[in-house]
């Protein structure tokens, strides 16, 4: 009898969490706020339960007394990850961070290292509430009424990623991350900015690789905008169609949402923009987005780190950037000329200092890395962050309506004067891999 009752409880909890889109979690010790789900340092993730930490080693519950919600917290001696089973969609998450008896410093990323909050500091005895708006996705393609009509053809490596899984995974990082509570609520109002592209756009899961797409959310205000990154390494416009990635986006996108499109690095392997079918497909993507009431934004591919003898960037992308510019003019679509902005940025850094923006690391800097890494296409976190600033600058300079949702985290940017790399703060995640992403 007891065994049957236990099974029923687990089944009900699993179904409940699989359907529910709003949760309140009180992180801490043995005292919990009424109406909140208690989370302790031993709350290991169980999909049947619906929430928990991916790894509980190194976690600590601290209770300072006083207020049940803010008087205690969970911290750790390494980055820690909290996951919640959620249906696909946009969510606004309110985080209470701090320590009523000490200081705290917390960096928050979600899913595949998507930057949301950076270096949130609280003085001794203070807690703060911060909100983030995130996108959760799965690989099922559905009609608007929810009927399943297909699936995205994921690559084998994608099945290990911290997305495509109907889980919201929050990474708490930093010098002294202290989390008092997490409140999650479905957000049906926020505009969604869908990102499509290749390895220079994707949410890269593994250090030291990074892309501008995963840095972009940091620069937008919560509640108003959700960044939904559907880019994947190695993809071309055609591959994005063949794997039904664009079908997935088209079934979800709503009037007033945005579709950012940046391809070219991999497409050029199949000939120039005409021969590879790039121009034709890109034009079709723009027209289809408009038919769906969405706002297409074309993004030229950034340059590779290739300099000539005069320390000027060499175009290695053939006619692809010009093709994007021409189609933007023909279709009267918004254009972010990241190709031009990156040329200015890389030349400002110069041949040697620009290595600090790319994946250039001595041997044994990362696990299973016997040889030095020297990649002139893919970026580290600093390079990705600088490119994301270029994208935000273009949104403002081009007077896109999105500019009104830029947060005050963006204080202006001049690619001729890049941020000093030594001033860039990025506490590394636990996920590391020296294997180069697909594409070049």
Image (cartoon, rainbow, N blue to C red):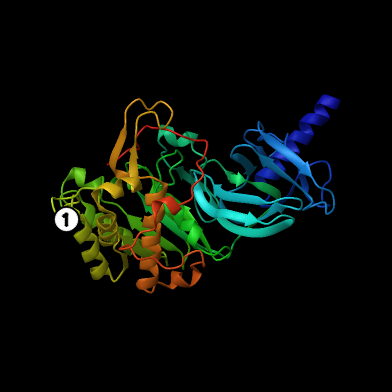
Q: Where's the C terminus, which quadrant?
A: top left
Q: Residue at x 84, y 45 (%)?
A: 31
Q: Where's the N terminus, which quadrant?
A: top right
202, above or below 432, in the image? below
Between residue 215 and residue 374, name the one nearer to us.
Answer: 374
In the image, residue 198 lies at what x, y percent? Answer: 34, 47
Mark 1 Cα within 10 Å, few/some/many (few <14, many 20+)?
Answer: some
Count of numbered labels shown in the rendering: 1
Disc 1 designates what residue? 319
Between residue 77 and residue 94, name the one nearer to us.
Answer: 77
236, above or below 92, in the image? above
- Tell me the SS state at disc 1: loop
Q: Residue at x 24, y 47 (%)?
A: 267
Q: Residue at x 37, y 50 (%)?
A: 383
In the image, residue 321 lies at what x, y percent? Answer: 22, 58
206, above or below 33, in the image? above
Q: Residue furthest left?
A: 309
Q: Is residue 48 visible?
A: no
In the image, residue 129 lies at what x, y percent? Answer: 67, 59
Q: Residue at x 48, y 73 (%)?
A: 404
Relative placement, left or right, of 360 versus 195 is: left
Relative placement, left or right, of 394 versus 76 is: left
Q: Is residue 186 visible?
A: yes
């Amino acid at each position: 009898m007891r065994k049957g009752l236990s099974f029923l409880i687990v089944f009900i909890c699993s179904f409940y969490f699989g359907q529910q889109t709003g949760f309140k979690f009180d992180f801490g010790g043995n005292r919990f706020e009424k109406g909140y789900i208690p989370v302790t340092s031993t709350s290991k993730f169980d999909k049947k339960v619906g929430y928990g930490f991916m790894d509980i080693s190194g976690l600590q519950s601290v209770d300072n007394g006083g207020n049940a919600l803010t008087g205690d917290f969970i911290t750790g001696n390494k980055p820690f990850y909290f996951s919640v089973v959620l249906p696909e969609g946009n969510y606004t998450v309110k985080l209470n961070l701090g320590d009523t008896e000490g200081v705290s410093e917390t960096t928050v990323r979600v899913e595949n290292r998507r930057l949301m909050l950076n270096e949130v500091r609280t003085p001794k005895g203070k807690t703060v509430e911060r909100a983030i708006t995130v996108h959760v996705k799965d690989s099922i393609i559905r009609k608007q009424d929810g009927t399943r009509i297909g699936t995205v053809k994921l690559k084998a490596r994608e099945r290990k990623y911290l997305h495509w899984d109907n889980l919201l995974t929050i990474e708490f990082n930093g010098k002294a991350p202290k989390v008092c509570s997490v409140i999650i609520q479905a957000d049906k109002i926020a505009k969604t900015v869908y990102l499509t592209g290749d390895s220079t756009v994707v949410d890269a899961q593994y250090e030291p690789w990074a892309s501008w797409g995963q840095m972009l959310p940091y620069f937008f205000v919560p509640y108003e905008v959700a960044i939904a990154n559907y880019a994947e390494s190695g993809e071309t416009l055609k591959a994005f169609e063949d794997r039904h990635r664009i079908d997935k986006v088209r079934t979800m996108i709503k009037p007033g949402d945005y579709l950012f499109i940046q391809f070219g690095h991999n497409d050029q392997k199949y000939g120039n923009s005409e021969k590879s079918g790039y121009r034709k497909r890109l034009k079709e993507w723009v027209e289809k987005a408009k038919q769906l009431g969405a706002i297409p934004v074309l993004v030229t591919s950034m340059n590779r780190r290739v300099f000539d003898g005069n320390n000027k960037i060499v175009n290695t992308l053939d006619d692809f950037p010009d093709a994007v510019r021409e189609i933007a003019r023909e279709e009267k679509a918004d254009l972010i000329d990241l190709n031009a902005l990156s040329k200015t940025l890389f030349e400002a850094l110069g041949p040697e200092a620009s290595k600090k923006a790319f994946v250039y690391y001595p041997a044994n800097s990362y696990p299973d890395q016997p040889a030095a890494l020297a990649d002139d296409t893919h970026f580290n976190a600093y390079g990705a962050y600088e490119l994301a600033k270029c994208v935000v600058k273009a949104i403002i300079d081009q007077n896109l309506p999105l500019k009104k949702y830029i947060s005050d985290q963006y204080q202006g940017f001049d690619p001729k004067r890049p941020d000093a790399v030594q001033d860039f703060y990025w506490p590394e995640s636990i996920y590391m891999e020296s294997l180069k992403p697909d594409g070049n």
